[in-house]
Amino acid sequence: MARLLELYRKEIVPKMMEKFKYKNVMEVPRIEKIVVSMGVGKAKDDRRFLDGAARDLAAITGQQPKLTKAKQHIAGFRLRKGQLVGCFVTLRGKRMYEFLDRFVNIALPRVRDFRGVSPTAFDNFGNFSQGLSDQFVFPEVDIDKSEGPQGMNVTIVIGRSSKEESMELLKLFGIPFYKPGKAVEKTVSKG
């Protein structure tokens, strides 16, 4: 069993039931799936960027990504309907919890100048989205074989929850949120 799944069942569910006064265990919000996606704008000119992004995404998630096509023409971007523009993976079950474990404990601490995750990163249904500027925060990616830094988006879909319940659930999983309204201190170099 995945470490975070065991943590969810033994520790998180009782804490959530106590805090939100649920009457039944089935009322407790749970993570339904995690979607990891990469939009590869350079793919319209050179297919190897998309192949490299798909290879990196497969190494990160342990699952073969699905390639996505443009849904419409966009003249400003010189994009034609049907061109390959990105890739994504939908994780469920054991792989989902293993990815979440690596995301929280390995990837987020390796993000440059990381001060915490935004508490406003939730939609109206309680789902959480976090963007990463490059895939190199995951140790599975081989920098020498990669086509270069590529941004990615991680969306955690949480069932049966509000923003407050989702935030509490993710805090219990170990995702650090920064306090809203606190100014981030800037260091000024003299010289």
Image: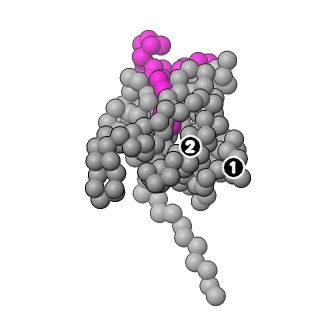
Q: Residue 96 versus residue 144: which sits nearer the camera?
A: 144
The residue carrying pointer 2 sits among few (fewer than 14), some (14 to 19) or many (20 or more) residues within 10 Å by Cα, namely some
Considering only vertical position in the picture, is 185 above or below 61? below
Secondary-structure class at tag 2:
helix
Count the marks. Answer: 2
Q: Left or right? Give the position of 187 relative to 81.
A: right
Q: Quadrant of the N terminus?
A: top right
Residue under label 1, please give it.
145
Q: Residue 99 versus residue 175: which sits nearer the camera?
A: 99
* Residue type at the position of mark 1: Lys
What residue is shown at x 53% (from left), y 23% (from top)?
92
What residue is shown at x 32% (from left), y 36% (from top)?
124
Q: Residue 59 versus residue 79: which sits nearer the camera?
A: 79
Q: Left or right? Give the position of 128 relative to 9.
A: left
Magenta span of residues: 9-37
The residue carrying pointer 1 sits among few (fewer than 14), some (14 to 19) or many (20 or more) residues within 10 Å by Cα, namely few
* Residue type at the position of mark 2: Asp
Residue 53 visible to the viewer: no
Considering only vertical position in the picture, is 87 above or below 48? above
Distance from Cα at disc 1 to Cα at disc 2: 11 Å
Secondary-structure class at tag 1:
loop
Q: Left or right? Give the position of 98 relative to 123.
A: right
What residue is shown at x 28% (from left), y 56% (from top)?
75
Q: Position of residue 177 (x, y in %)?
A: 51, 46
Q: Quadrant of the C terminus?
A: bottom right
Figure quadrant of residue 123? top left
Q: Are marks 1 and 2 in contact (CB under 8 Å)?
A: no
Q: Earlier in the sequence, mark 1 or mark 2?
A: 2
Rendered image: mark on residue 173: none
Residue under label 2, please give it.
51
Q: Position of residue 91 (x, y in %)?
A: 53, 27
Magenta highlight on residue 116: no
